[in-house]
């Protein structure tokens, strides 16, 4: 059997498809698994050893249609489920199984604060797309493969010991998911543990500003200096991680690193909280409850629609700091 798994973006969503791919590989005999995603996320699939072949979209899905048709897939597993992936299925003419996106329920929650969402992680909803194949969630922890040549020696790079530092994942695609710098100042202020700041190149300036707040503190700016896999290596060796609702949170859960997750405009009720079925990963979620405007979006904005950004500005910095110290 030959299967095409489809998920275009983004980092966290793709990482959370890895348990699905693993179970397909382990539970179906002689299965060959291909994966279709955007070119910008293609290297991420190297972390999932069960993917036999990857296809990446450089500009348009249409450029890949002849190539995908030639593969003669038996089944398409659509884990994105939008207009583009439905169009892809029609063009391929292949039997397709999709997961429920629950867009109406999400809209009710963001627009009217009426919660009709089931208490299910998105991974479990991904698995619902494979019921007809007889593939079930094995309940094991997610995995993220790090090649030896991508391993970062933290002692050589930062002068710190493995298992004795805090990772602060400061980036996120949308500003309303990011902890603002004044809250970072409050949270990191009295910590004695060494800190490594992680994010993309776009986060390097914020990281430098954070470092400048603490000239005498052992804070290392690693934003944009490593590949995603290299950053993952740094996370895997950390004592704990403090993170926004972002892809690095889901990567950290693959390694049972204790997680302090700070939620801004999004909420765990969307089913995108840290996935940890097998290993007892300690996850502490911080949210500002009782805000009439939250959640304002299922993904985020580049600016708070209300202008006050209370979902982050009202976070209890002392409680977060205490969770880190514990």
Image (spheres, rainbow, N blue to C red):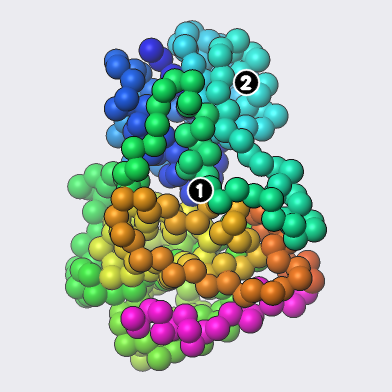
Measure how far apart labels 2 and 1 are at the Cα level. Answer: 26 Å
Q: Is residue 157 visible?
A: no
Q: Which residue is mark 1?
A: 121
The magenta-colored residue range is 307-326
Q: Position of residue 24 (x, y in %)?
A: 37, 27
Of mark 2 and mark 1, the one earlier in the sequence is: 2
Is residue 142 visible to the viewer in this orientation of the structure?
Answer: yes
Numbered circles on residues, count: 2
Give me the residue at 69% from left, 62% from top.
295
Above or below, 160 against 198 in this view is below
Element at badge 1? loop
Compared across the picture, whether 30 is left or right of 35 comes to left
Closer to the camera, 62 or 193? 193
Pointer 2 residue: 88
**Quarter of image, res 322:** bottom left
Q: Is residue 61 above or below residue 180?
A: above
Which structural element holds mark 2? helix
Magenta segment includes 93:
no
Q: In which quadrant is the C terminus drawn?
A: bottom left
Give the x, y percent position of residue 107. 75, 49
In terms of image quadrants, where is residue 164? bottom left
Instruction: Please tell me which residue is depicted at 23% across the width and 66% down the height of the picture.
Output: 154
Task: Residue 126 in the image: state x and y as whole percent.
Answer: 50, 36
The residue that appears at 57% across and 33% down in the rendered structure is: 99
């Amino acid at each position: 059997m030959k299967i095409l798994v489809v998920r275009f973006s983004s980092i966290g969503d793709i990482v959370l498809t890895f348990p699905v791919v693993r179970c397909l590989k382990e539970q179906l005999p002689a299965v060959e698994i291909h994966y279709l995603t955007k070119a910008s996320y293609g290297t991420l699939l190297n972390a999932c050893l069960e993917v036999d072949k990857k296809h990446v979209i450089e500009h348009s899905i249409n450029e890949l249609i002849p190539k995908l048709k030639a593969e003669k897939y038996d089944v398409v597993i659509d884990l994105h489920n939008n207009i583009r992936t439905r169009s892809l299925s029609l063009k391929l003419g292949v039997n397709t199984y999709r997961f429920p996106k629950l867009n109406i329920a999400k809209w009710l929650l963001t627009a009217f604060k009426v919660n009709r969402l089931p208490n299910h992680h998105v991974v479990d909803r991904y698995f619902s797309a494979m019921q007809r194949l007889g593939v079930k969630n094995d309940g094991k922890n997610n995995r993220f493969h790090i090649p030896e040549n991508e391993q970062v020696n933290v002692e050589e790079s930062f002068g710190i010991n493995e298992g004795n530092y805090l990772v602060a994942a400061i980036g996120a695609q949308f500003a309303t998911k990011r902890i603002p710098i004044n809250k970072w100042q409050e949270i990191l202020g009295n910590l004695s543990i060494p800190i490594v700041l992680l994010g993309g190149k776009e986060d390097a300036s914020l990281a430098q500003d954070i470092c400048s707040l603490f000239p005498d503190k052992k804070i290392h700016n690693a934003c944009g200096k490593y590949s995603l896999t290299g950053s993952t290596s740094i996370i895997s060796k950390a004592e704990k991680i403090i993170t926004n609702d972002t892809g690095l949170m889901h990567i950290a859960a693959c390694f049972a690193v204790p997680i302090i997750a700070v939620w801004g405009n999004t909420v765990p009720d969307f089913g995108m909280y840290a996935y940890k079925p097998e290993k007892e990963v300690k996850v502490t979620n911080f949210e500002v409850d009782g805000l009439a405007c939250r959640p304002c979006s299922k993904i985020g904005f580049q600016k708070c629609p209300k202008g006050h950004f209370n979902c982050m500005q009202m976070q209890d910095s002392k409680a977060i700091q205490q969770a880190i110290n514990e």
